[in-house]
Amino acid sequence: MSLSVRDANHHVDRILDLVRRGLSEHNSSDVVAQSWTRCLNKYSLHPAEAYSPSFVARVELEERRERLNDVIACARYEMATLYQQLADTETAVVLTDPDGVIVHVVSSPEFAAEVGPLGLRVGGMWSETAAGTNGMGTCLAAGGPVSVRREDHFYALFTQLTCSAVPVYDPSGEITAVLDVTSRSSLMQQHLLVLLGMTARMIENRLIDMRYRNAHPLHFHSRPEFVYTLHEGKLAVGEDGRVLAANRSALFQLGLQSVADIRARRIEDLFETSLEDMLQRSTSSSFHPVVTYRANATLRFFAVARRPAASAVATPVAAVATAPRATLRLVSSRGSSDDAIFKDPRLAARLETARRVIARQTPVLLCGETGSGKEVFARAVHETSPHASGAFVAINCASLPETLIESELFGYRAGAFTGAQRTGRRGKILQADGGTLFLDEIADMPLDLQARLLRVLDERQVTPLGTEETHAVNFQLISASHQHLPGLVREGRFREDLYYRLAGIELQIPPLRERSDCSELIASVLAAEGGPNAKLSPEAQALLMEHPWPGNIRQLRHVLRTAAALADGKPITREHLPTLQAVLAPVAQATAAVAAVAPRVRAEPAPEAELPVKLNPIQANERQVLLRLLEQHRWNVSNVAKALDVSRNTLYRKLHKLHIEVSHPE
C-alpha cells in the first residue's frame, strides 16, 4: 500500500492549493473540502507530516466498549451479514464509538493484518483530529453519510483505501456509533452507502427492542406492505400510552424533527386511536396491519401494536429459549426418530435468532452448502414459532420443471390447462396458510415468477391460475439457497426487491466439516439409519471425523445407511465405508484411474484465473467441492447426482453455472 514520493508530493500540493483557492473551485465533494479545511486551519494538521496511528490504552478501550455494550451486541451480527453480502476479502466492516475509536471490526485475517499497522483495528483512533479526513472521522464531524475515496483522504498513506460511513443513532436520537466499510477495492460508493444505511437502521431498530423490552412495540407505515420492513416507523410505547422512543422513519412519517418532539406524547396525540384499541384490533387481525389516521389530519396509516417482549407468556417458543444451548434438541415434524441436534454453539445461536425474528413476522433467508441441513433447520424454527400449529409446506424450486412451478405455488382451478386435475389444486402458498412456507433453492426460481411471488408477499393474497378469485393468506416465510444471492442480484439473475423482501434476516448454516458437534451428529444419524444397536469401530469413527463431507449431512446419511446395511448388525469398520476410503487414495492413482476408465466424459476444468467470469468466494468454494466430487466418482455425473441427492438436470445446470465442462452422456 506504498505510494511513490512523487505521488505523495502531488497529493500534498493538491490539498494545499485547493484549500488556499477556496471551496468553489474544488472538484471533490464539499464535505471532503470542508474536512481538509478543518484539518489545516482548525486542527493544525499538515498532509506532508509523517502519519503515526493513535490507539487508546487497554483499560480505556474496555471502558468504551462497556459503555457501548448493547450497541456492539446489536451490531455484531448485522456487520457480519454485511461483510458476507459484500463478498470481498479486501474489505473491513468497522464500528466506532462517538469519538471515532474503533470498538469492533469484521474482516478477513489477511486484510486485517495488512491494515492493522495503519490503525484500522480495535482501539484505533479515527477522529479527524487523529487521522485527518477519513470515512469514520468525517462522518462524525459532518453528522451524516460520507464517502471518502482514495485521493480524498488527508494523508497520502490512506490513498489506496476507500471509506464509506454512516451514523448510527440511539433511541434518544443521538449519534451513538459510526458504521464504516473500508476497502482497497473500487466499490460503487452510492450502492455501498445504501447498504450501510439499511444496516444502520437494522441496528437502530434492534437497539430500541433491547433497551425497551418492557414497552409496547408499535409498527406503522402509510403503505401496508412496508410494515415489518426496514422502511416502517417504529415506536416504543409505555403502559400508559406515552411514547418512549422512535426510529428515524417514524419521525419522518409523522412530520417531526427529533425524538424530543415525540417523547412523552400519548398515542392519542399521534393517531386517532388509543393503545388499548390498537392492541385489541392488532390481535383480532392476527397482527396484520390495521387502518388508523393521523390525529387532526387526513393522513392514513397501517399499524400493528404488540405486548412487551419482556412480558410474553411461557409458550413452547419460550421453553426452547430457556433450554440449555448445549442440549437444544428438536424432534422432526416428519415424525421420524431422527432428531435434529443443534449442539454446535453457532448453529444454536442462529436457531435462537431465527426463533426471535420469526415471532415478529420477519422473513428468514438461510444460506449454506447443499445438504447442510437447511430444511431441518427451517422445520426446527417452524416447530417453535407462533405458527407451529399450522402446516410446514416445503417446495424445492430447483427440482420442479419451470412449467410447473407457477401451478405448484399458486394452484389452479379445474380445467385451467391441459393435464390439470379435474378438481383443481390448492397451491403450496394456500396450503401454508396459518403455517410456514419454506422455499428451498429460491435462486432457481425464474425471474417472471419472482415478480408474482413478490406481489404475494406484499399483498398477502393469492390468485390461482385460471381464476380471478383472490384468497387472503397468512404464513411465515423461510427461504434457502446454496447460491450467493447478492451476486445473482448484481448479475441481474435475481430481483433485488425480492432479495430484500426475503432477507429480513440472513442466517448462514455451517457445513458439516465446520460443525463442532460432528461426533454427536454422526451418532444421531447412525441411530436413525442403523437402529439403536448400530456401533462404529474406533477406526471407522476416525475415518468419518476426518472426511471433508462435500455433500454434508445428506452425504453422511447415505454413507451410514450403506455402512449399516453392509455391517448387518456387526460393528461398522473401515471396510464398510468404501466410498470414504477411495477419497484417501493417492491423487496420482485417482487421476490415472479417471484417465483409463472415463476419458470420454472428462474435460479439463479451466483454472479460476481463466474463467470467463469472476466467481464470488461462495461460488469458488462450491466449484472446488464439485470438482473433488467428480474426481472421487471418476467424472460419472450420474453417481455425483446420486451422492448429492439431486437430479442430473439440476447438476448439469450447476456445472454450467460454475463453468465446469463435461460432455453430456445423452
Image (spheres, rainbow, N blue to C red):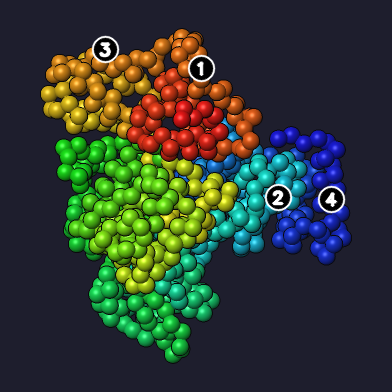
Kind of residue sitting beneath label 3:
Glu
Residue type at tag 4: Arg
Left or right of 68, for residue 139 = right
Determine the CA span between mark 2 and mark 1: 52 Å
Q: Residue at x 67, y 45 (%)?
A: 186
Q: Is residue 242 left or right of residue 540?
A: right
Query: In which quadrant will I find the N terminus?
Result: top right
From this viewpoint, is residue 330 visible?
yes
* Residue 303, quarter of picture: bottom left
Rendering coords of residue 574 (x, y %) = 27, 13
Secondary structure beneath dot 3 equals: helix
Q: Nearer the viewer, mark 1 or mark 4?
A: 1
Q: Quadrant of residue 17?
A: bottom right
Q: CA distance from mark 1 to mark 4?
A: 63 Å
Q: Which residue is mark 1?
A: 599
Neighbour tally class for label 3: few under 14, some 14-19, many 20 plus, Cα within 10 Å: few
Residue underneath mark 4: 14
Q: Could you say which disc has been placed on residue 165 in the image?
A: none
Q: Are marks 3 and 4 in contact (CB under 8 Å)?
A: no
Q: What residue sits right under mark 3 in the picture?
A: 575
SS class of the residue under badge 4?
A: helix
**Residue topped by disc 2:** 149
Instruction: Examine the rendered structure and indicate whether residue 205 appears above or below residue 342.
Output: below
Instruction: Check if mark 1's residue and mark 4's residue have beta carbons within 8 Å.
Output: no
* Local crowd size for mark 2, using a 10 Å CA cut-off: few (<14), some (14–19), many (≥20): many
**Residue type pointed to by label 2:** Arg
